[in-house]
């Protein structure tokens, strides 16, 4: 069962990592990154080791900066060495590092990153049971939980080119969700 994901990324790709973290949060998965978690008494090396060893999956964001980052490559090495499930997000035009060159990657560009996040969520849903969706209502700001939309319905909405629709349990306004990331759309 996947409940916790380690996100490996370069410092320059923190924005992409934050988007991934929000998408994982929406489907009730905890995420961890050594760049977002800081402690005074624990070294970066120990923090990385702890994060990877206590995660069920490692998602590596590989842009040009990520591929060239020594830290990202060390995290890949530790992930391989501890036999973690690794899901590479690979920016078009880049190549997977040699330690994970045998893996399938999810390709993306800056314009198609949400699509790649949708594939990550779909892949994780196929590996584990995801029951709950967390939504912060764009109307009233309250956070609510609901059963996650079945994947068949997500696929249907994607084909139609529309959004998922739900209702806020607090203010009772209709909330439209991006079917890839389950992120609420801002009200018109």
Image (cartoon, helix red, strand yellow):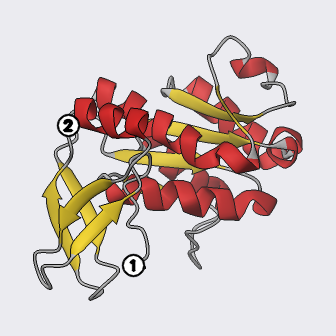
Picture quarter containing residue 174?
A: bottom left
Q: Is residue 18 left or right of residue 127?
A: right
> Can residue 33 be seen in the rendering of this structure?
no
- Tell which tag, 1 or 2, sits nearer the viewer: 1
Q: Is residue 85 left or right of residue 3?
A: right
- In this view, the residue in front, 107 or 52, is 107
Picture quarter containing residue 25?
A: bottom left
In the image, residue 161 above or below residue 84: below
Viewport quadrant of the N terminus: top left
Marked residue nearer the N-terminal end (1 or 2) = 2
- In this view, the residue in front, 36 or 133, is 133
Disc ID at residue 187: 1
- In this view, the residue in front, 72 or 94, is 94
Q: Residues within 10 Å of mark 1 (few under 14, many from 20)?
A: few
Percent position of residue 111, x then y: 71, 49
> Can residue 71 be seen in the rendering of this structure?
yes
Percent position of residue 53, x then y: 46, 41
Disc ID at residue 150: 2
**Which residue lies at the image location 25% right of the left edge and 29% below the top edge?**
152
In the image, residue 102 above or below residue 182: above
In the image, residue 145 above or below residue 147: below
SS of the residue under disc 2: loop
């Amino acid at each position: 069962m996947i409940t916790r994901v380690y996100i490996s990324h370069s410092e320059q790709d923190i924005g992409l990592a934050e988007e991934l973290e929000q998408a994982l949060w929406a489907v009730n998965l905890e995420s961890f990154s050594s760049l977002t978690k800081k402690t005074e008494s624990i070294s970066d090396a120990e923090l990385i080791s702890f994060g990877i060893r206590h995660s069920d999956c490692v998602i590596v964001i590989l842009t040009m900066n990520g591929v060239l980052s020594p830290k990202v490559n060390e995290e890949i090495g530790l992930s391989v060495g501890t036999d973690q499930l690794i899901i590479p997000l690979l920016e078009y035009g880049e190549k997977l590092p040699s330690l994970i060159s045998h893996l399938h990657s999810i390709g993306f560009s800056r314009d198609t990153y949400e699509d790649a996040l949708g594939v990550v969520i779909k892949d994780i849903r196929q590996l584990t049971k995801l029951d709950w969706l967390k939504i912060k209502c764009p109307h009233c700001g309250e956070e609510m939980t609901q059963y996650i939309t079945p994947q068949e319905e997500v696929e249907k909405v994607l084909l139609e080119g529309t959004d998922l629709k739900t209702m806020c349990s607090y203010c009772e306004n209709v909330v439209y969700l991006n079917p890839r990331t389950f992120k609420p759309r801002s009200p018109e």
